[in-house]
Image (tube, grey):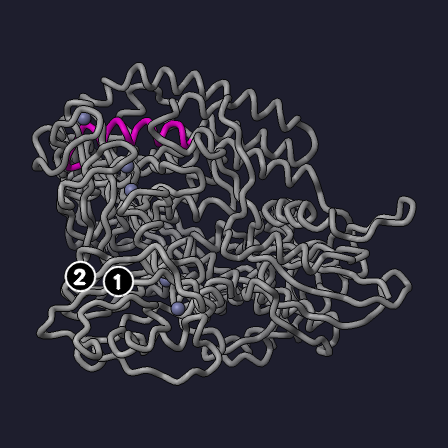
Amino acid sequence: MKTVLMVAEKPSLAQSIAKILSRGSCSSRKGLNGACSVHEYTGSFMGQSVRFKMTSVCGHVMSLDFIGKYNNWDKVDPAELFSTAPTEKKEANPKLNMVKFLQVEGRGCDYVVLWLDCDKEGENICFEVLDAIQPVMNKAYCNESTVFRAKFSSITDTDICNAMNHLGEPNRNEALSVDARQELDLRIGCAFTRFQTKYFQGKYGNLDSALVSFGPCQTPTLGFCVERHDKITSFKPEPYWVVQTKVSRGKDVSLTLDWDRVRVFDREVAQMFLNIVKTAREARVESVSKKEKAKQRPQALNTVEMLRVASSALGMGPQHTMQIAERLYTQGYISYPRTETTHYPENFDLTGALRQQASNPFWADSVKALLSEGINRPRKGNDAGDHPPITPMRSASESELGSDGWRLFDYITRHFIATLSYDCKYLQTTIAFSVSTESFTCTGKTLISAGFTEVMPWQSIPEEESLPVCERGDVFTVDEVKLLEKHTSPPDYLTEAELITLMEKHGIGTDASIPVHINNICQRNYVTVESGRRLKPTNLGIVLVHGYYKTDAELVLPTIRSAVEKQLNLIAQGKANFKQVLQFTLDIFKRKFHYFVDSIASMDELMEVSFSPIAATGKPLSRCGKCHRFMKYIQAKPSRLHCSHCDETYSLPQNGAIKLYKELRCPLDEFELVLWSTGSRGKSYPLCPYCYSNPPFRDMKKGMGCSECTHPTCQHSLNSLGIGQCVECENGVLVFDPTSGPKWRMACNKCNVVVHFFENAHKVRVSSESCESCEASLVIVDFNKARSPLPGDETQHTGCAFCDPVFQDLVELKHAAMRHPMHRGGAGRRQGRGRGRRPAPKKPKDKMAALAAYFV
Ligand SMILES: [Zn+2]
Ligand SMILES: [Zn+2]
Ligand SMILES: [Zn+2]
Ligand SMILES: [Zn+2]
Ligand SMILES: [Zn+2]
């Protein structure tokens, strides 16, 4: 029997789709990476009986990065990143072992059906999956096609089965446009960010950012927020005057009239009009007009409109909204939430979707009325050809969806019902008056039929007192005439909703990337989110934008980015060449980069006003390995070390104390080591400031301490002090902390695990020999004669911390013993001596649970 492999974008989607296609009769098992499951069943495919295997990835399989040495900030001129630096695709999350997993499941399969989400990112992941599995799949007969793409917009029986019956092919051009965007963002973003970060952090002591980043789309986004800020600060309120008149007829009718001139900006002119109006006792009705007006029902919902309303009406940020919308989609409540389309295709079953909502108490009445009366045709919108507008696919209750999930679903559903409802109709009455030689009017609205506003009450026409019945020639008494002095007021900071509108209008960012860019400028401390979800730029954000503007306005203006995104769309449509677009864009930005570097001084002039120079901050701590003078420790976040002689800045781990480590030096570069610790109960490890910023060996990451360094002979390295595999996490190593005596401990170099042992021992060392049964390094422990807990008169013992019977009571392994490879599978528990005196090591979060929560 032949095998068909099917791959979805997330584990939960694979499960839902498999359930639908197998009619609930699939069997499931965990995949080798623990994160993905495989659902199997038999069925028919292209007229033959086959075995189906449905599984998933967890988002992108690969991510783009520079190869090894180009990740070193100190050894590479950022200008090289535009052209010379080669890139490679690396596994996006090595812990998930996705490529291996796909190959294990894909080996020997005959066909593959790609069920990735139907947007450009999904198309890109299709080819990542194919790259992994095609080499291990069975060879096709003749030219039989073996690769299929399923196109679907919601996780419902109809949509999924329909997709299975109309399989197509993956679209290489769309995938390429994503590759192009990734490469442009990586090269341009990294070059500018590295140069700026090094330059500014090396120059200013109180710069409040860990990273001074530049992004070809992120920066124009920030630009909009700062532009508004500039308007606010340069705003000069102007006084103006309004003539207000109140008239009445009899006791019951009293009206406040609007002046036809609205306002004047000259006090004397205003005074003159006041005097004219004041002389009159009567207001004469010149005309009465009645007009029937309509408030249009909304267009069908697309992503940006959903983000706007979620932010302004529900108080939910774009990133958060997208996460919730995706969850609703994955669980089958709504159709795919990433779409630009506001137009329903002709064959879309609107009535069917509406019928789903007929039993929901919150809008059942409106839905039933519509169903019996017949739905209205939705307004014509824009058909981007990707997906239908965002539509509720089934009914739901608040208890099923959770608070935010329900609020978003409630909105999406009401919006959907509104698009099928009738326009709201009202009568607008305008009475025009003349008072002396001046004209005034008074308008009122009365509702004729509520239409869609019944289901969207926040859109309804506010109830007003109705206007009196009168006709031309009627006379009212003037009760009061006065001059109001007012001031023009400045605009407020941009709301998220306004920012989304601006990004959409200028063609920067897509439905997928708008939330990401907005989130980035918040997280990187360039704007803060104020009440009403208004975005207020920080000092740093303002200085950066002003600086770019001064050197090269195009770095901030949306024009270039929008042009690039147009080119990317042309690649996706097969109308532009991937390589040419890339080359052309990089050339432009390379020239911009050189110009920026040459003009950096003009940025400095702005920075100096807001930030203090690094030479004036910090205190001497450790010696530089290049010039052997003292470097200054700058405690303000991000804390770092600065050598003013070499004019170099080195990053440090954050959120802990830093002190000099026994004046020891790194054998590789002679920098003095410093010790980072989070207090007496927490973790600590020594690190070399140079190696921390510039990993000495390939495959080491930035930000590693000596406890992770693989230097073969250094006495502070992992090689010398590593004891054994971590008891909690997969890749961690428990490393002995030689500074921890007399409360000796070892700590994992990856997770939070700390294991205490040999309390009050005089000396603890790690031997070069290892345990025969568990391969952990042996430890040599010396106790004082008087207080030795060792049997007999012994003061020294060498053994394995995990297996040695003499040591068993001296190691706080309650937690560890159950998990260590030696003891998995039910060996007896041991009770460490430390138990009861000190809290057990903090249990790290269950990884699978955390992962599962992330990928719902
Ligand atoms: Zn130096
Ligand atoms: Zn070093
Ligand atoms: Zn080292
Ligand atoms: Zn660990
Ligand atoms: Zn052992």
Which structural element holds mark 2? strand
Residue at 36% over, 15% down: 595
Left or right, 757 with reference to 613: right
Mark 1 → mark 2, Cα distance in angstroms: 8 Å
**Residue annotated with mark 1:** 780
Report if the CB atoms under discs 1 and 2 are less than 8 Å apart.
Answer: yes
Residue under circle 2?
A: 763
* Magenta segment boundaries in residue numbering: 189-206
Q: Sequence-wise, which precedes: disc 1 or disc 2?
A: 2
User: As drawn, is 655 to the left or to the right of 801?
Assistant: left
Neighbours of disc 1 within 10 Å: few (<14), some (14-19), many (20+): some
Q: Quadrant of residue 672?
A: top left
Examine the structure image and report whether residue 456 is included in the region drawn in magenta: no
Beta carbon at label 2 within 8 Å of ligand 5:
no
Q: Residues within 10 Å of mark 2 (few under 14, many from 20)?
A: some
Callout 2, which amino acid? Answer: Lys
Q: Please report the residue visible at 63 percent of the width from the left and 28 percent of the height from the top.
A: 578
Question: Which of the two residues, 710 or 552, is positioned nearer the viewer here?
Answer: 710
Residue 585 vertical placement versus 206 (above, below): above
